[in-house]
Structure formats: C-alpha cells, structure tokens
Image (cartoon, rainbow, N blue to C red):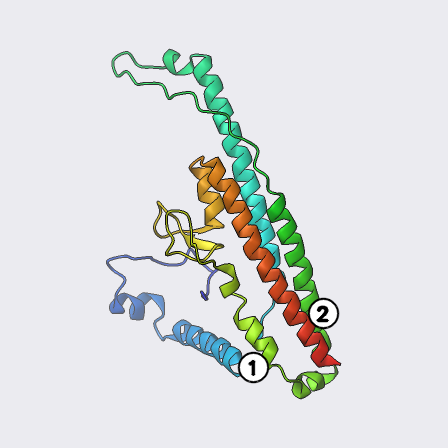
Amino acid sequence: MNIGFGGEDGGGIYHSIYDDFYWYTHFSDTNFQYGRALAQTGGTAILRLADADLLPFEFGDFADTMDTYVKELKTLAQKTQADIQERNHEIEEGVFQATDDPKKPLIAPPVEPAAPYLNFAPLDNATVVLGRSAVEYRKAFEKINSNGGSALAAASLADVNRLLIQSERKLTNAEGLPNRPWFKHQIYAPGFYTGYAAKTMPAVREAIEQKQWKQAEAGIVVVAHVLQDEAELISAAAAKLGAAAH
C-alpha cells in the first residue's frame, strides 16, 4: 500500500543530500503536522482493515484498472508494429545512407521482421468476466449492508473473508515471470531492465518491448488465466455473501 499527500506543489525533494532532519524541521514539515496526519491516516486504514467483520475490499476499480492495462498493451503493440514498419521503410529508401556523415560514418540498422498481430482475445474475455464479477460482489456487498448492516451482523462471514484474503494471491502463479521465476506476481513487477519502476502485466509488456512475439502470446494466455481465476474467486465470494444476506 502506498499513501501520501500531494497536489499543492511539485512534491519537494527526492533523495537529495540535503534531505536530512534539519531540512525537514526547518523547511518541509516544521511542526510535523503532515507527518502526523499521514501516520494517522495509515493507522486508521490498518485498523479499519484489521477490525472489520467483513474485509473492506472492493473490486470495481481493480477491474477497470485491468481493462486499462490491456488497452495500454494493445497500444504498445500497435506502436511497435508501426515503428518497425516505418524503420524498415526508411532503410529501404536509403534514409540512413543519405543522412550519414562521411567523417563519422555509422552503420544503418538491419531490416527487422514485420511484427505480427497479437491475439488479445483471452485478455479481453478475462477483463469482461472480471468486470462482471466485480459488479456481482458490489451488489452482494450493498445488499448485506442494507438495513443498517443487520444482515452483516448476523451472518457468518468467515468463509467470505477466507476467500477475500486469497484475492491477491490469485494474481500469482508458481512458474513466475519469464527469465525471472522468483517474481510470481503476474500483474506487477519491477522492470527487467529498470530494476525499480514497476511494469504492469510484465510477461506481456516486456515481451512486446523486446519484440519477443511468441513469448508475448504465451504471456497473454498466462495473465488471462490469472484474471479468470481472480474473477471466479470474486464471484464465489459474492455468492457466499449473497447467501449470508438471506
């Protein structure tokens, strides 16, 4: 979980040699109001999570985010196709030879194989199912919380909570990512070459970036399977929650 305050300015400094206690108490948060507010916010969120009879999870934003990631992958694939096509055209037209400096000669890049069209249907189907399951859970959640939450107070929610606890783990698989089996999460991972910035749906995204088309196709199937499993879990939790409300 990552929480913070922002929007008033550019965010101050980041990893500066001047980022010390003196700077913090004289220029950043002189009376510790922001630090205290952030600690209170984080503490309240953790207490809310720890003490809730029903874990306060909501899957609508997650489903929308997964749909956004798939759209980003499609855009990336299309741009990569277009870039290869344009570069090959420039090579064939002799653009690199024409613009080469004879005093500092360079070697023109080789012609690349045309990028294939990837089959995103498994991911499209998975995100649709995920969106439906999120709606199912929201409706069941609203129903059990109606009438002042009396149904929630009377219901046995242990089974639902056990499912909800598994929801993040469903986004992993035992095989891990290509070339990095120790990274099990299929939605988020540090970039293979960035080492810090996160890549979303990395098995697919990084394969496209590296023009490993067969690996990208395989990654699409893997990530789609993970999202299908997540959707099934959410639907199961919604069904148990709905039964508890009766």
Q: Residue 36, image x and y in percent?
A: 41, 76
Quarter of the image where one finds residue 94: top left
Q: In the rendered view, does 164 fall on the left or right side of 208?
A: right
> At 57% from the left edge and 40% from the top edge, which residue is drawn?
74
Vertical side of 112 occupied by 192: above or below: below
| Rendering quarter of residue 207 | top left
Please indicate, yes or no, whether residue 21 appears anywhere in the rendered image. Answer: yes
In-image side of 112 versus 59 (left or right): left
Answer few, some or many: residues within 10 Å of disc 1's Cα (few below 14, many 20 plus, some between 14 and 19): few
At which x and y percent is residue 92?
Answer: 46, 14
Q: Residue at x 53, y 79 (%)?
A: 48
Tell me the quarter of the image containing the N terminus. bottom left
Compute the Cα span from label 2 to label 1: 19 Å
For label 2, the residue is 139
- Residue 219, image x, y percentages: 50, 46
Residue 52, numbered label: 1
Q: Could you tell me which residue is drawn at 56 percent across and 71 percent down? A: 164
